[in-house]
Amino acid sequence: MKKRKLVRALLPLMMIAFIVVLSGCSQAMVLDPKGPVGAQQKDLIMISTVLCTIILVPVLALTAWIVWRYRDKAGNKASYKPNWAHSTTLEVVWWAIPIIIIATLAVVTVRYTHALEPSKPLKSDKAPITIQVTSLDWKWLFTYPEQGIATVNYLQIPEDTPIKFELTSDAPMNSFWVPQLGGQIYTMSGMAMTLYLQADEIGHYFGTGANFSGEHFADMTFDVNATSQQDFEEFIAKTKKVPAKLTMESYEALAKPGKSGVQYFSAIPDGLFEKVVTKYTKGQSAHSGHGGGETATEAKKASGSETSKDMDKMDHSQMKMTK
């Protein structure tokens, strides 16, 4: 009997400890947005949470009170009405309030969903920069068609500038996600998706694949470095001096299943992204989603077909980038 009472006394403490442990495992990055898209998504999360709490808290509290009030105990003086069947007042309360909250939540969700359409350009005085994203097994390839360079598992962008991501997959479907900048979007073979994001301040952000894609899916993470415009231009200039050039031959090697470290390429094949999108269509037109049918300026022509033997050995230290 004493053991049972002890367990009941410790149960609330165990639940609190469990919640604390779970909260410690997550950095709650979506609640610390660093861009306009992430900020709006945080607002939607908070509004939805508050509206749901209005229903959940009273229901849970009332459930606990009923269990305690009408428990089977000698001398319990709770009213007993076996023939009670209906109360108009209670029916109005427990139907009207949820309906109003659900309707409000529906209106809010529709408005935010329309405002957060992934392919909708962000309002800015600066022209967007296009970055093409290809998910591979088990790595991310980022090509900068306007600058003619490419990186693997590393993304550098200028602050306060809209980034137009064009996304596809040359492997099983995955999901591109930078939690502090905005929500995730799928990458799929034979499809070109479009996603606009922006970093409002200089910082180092976590990027990942948010979809199960096989043995090493947990290793599909990438660094996002938001820098000043000057530092971004220096990054482009330094990358253009890297000996490694991405050719169709080296791309085919890169696309084979396997993990990869950070890599940099000073040149990319002409139209690589478009070739990846259409390689599985077998003569049919490629699908596009969220405005993905309109691709950016094609990649600049690679200067030579040299394949780097040191691709797998490159890292951030060799580039001497400022984080």
Image (spheres, rainbow, N blue to C red):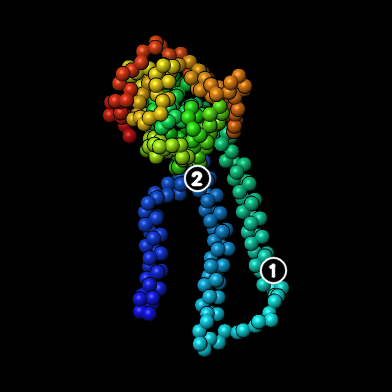
Give me the C-alpha separation between circle 1 and circle 2.
37 Å
Badge 1 crowding class, 10 Å Cα cut-off, few under 14, some 14 to 19, many 20 or more, is few
Q: Which amino acid lies under the numbered mark 1 shown in the image of this protein? A: Val
Where is residue 109? Give x, y as percent. 61, 48
> Which quadrant is home to the C terminus?
top left
Task: Give the mark count.
Answer: 2
Picture residue at 66% right of the left edge, 82% below the top = 82
Where is residue 300? Give x, y as percent. 47, 16
Q: Which residue is mark 2?
A: 39
Nearer to us in this view, 287 or 195: 287
Image check: 51 left or right of 96?
Answer: left
Badge 2 crowding class, 10 Å Cα cut-off, few under 14, some 14 to 19, many 20 or more, is some
Tell me if I can see residue 9 in this picture.
Answer: no
Which comes sooner in the sequence, label 1 or label 2?
A: 2
Is the C-beta separation of discs 1 and 2 under 8 Å? no
Quadrant of res 258: top left
Tell me if I can see residue 132 in this picture.
Answer: yes
> Which quadrant is home to the N terminus?
bottom left
Where is residue 98? Give x, y as percent. 64, 62
Instruction: Identify the element where label 1 is drawn.
Output: helix
Q: Which residue is mark 1?
A: 92
Q: Which mark is residue 55?
A: none
Image check: 108 left or right of 37?
Answer: right
Image check: 198 left or right of 306?
Answer: right
Where is residue 198? Give x, y as percent. 48, 36
Picture residue at 52% right of the left edge, 46% below the top = 41
Picture residue at 49% right of the left edge, 37% below the top = 175
Residue at the limit of the structure toward the bottom, as seen here: 75
Instruction: Identify the element where label 2 is drawn.
Output: helix
Residue 11, compared with residue 219, is above or below; it is: below
Picture residue at 55% right of the left edge, 49% below the top = 44
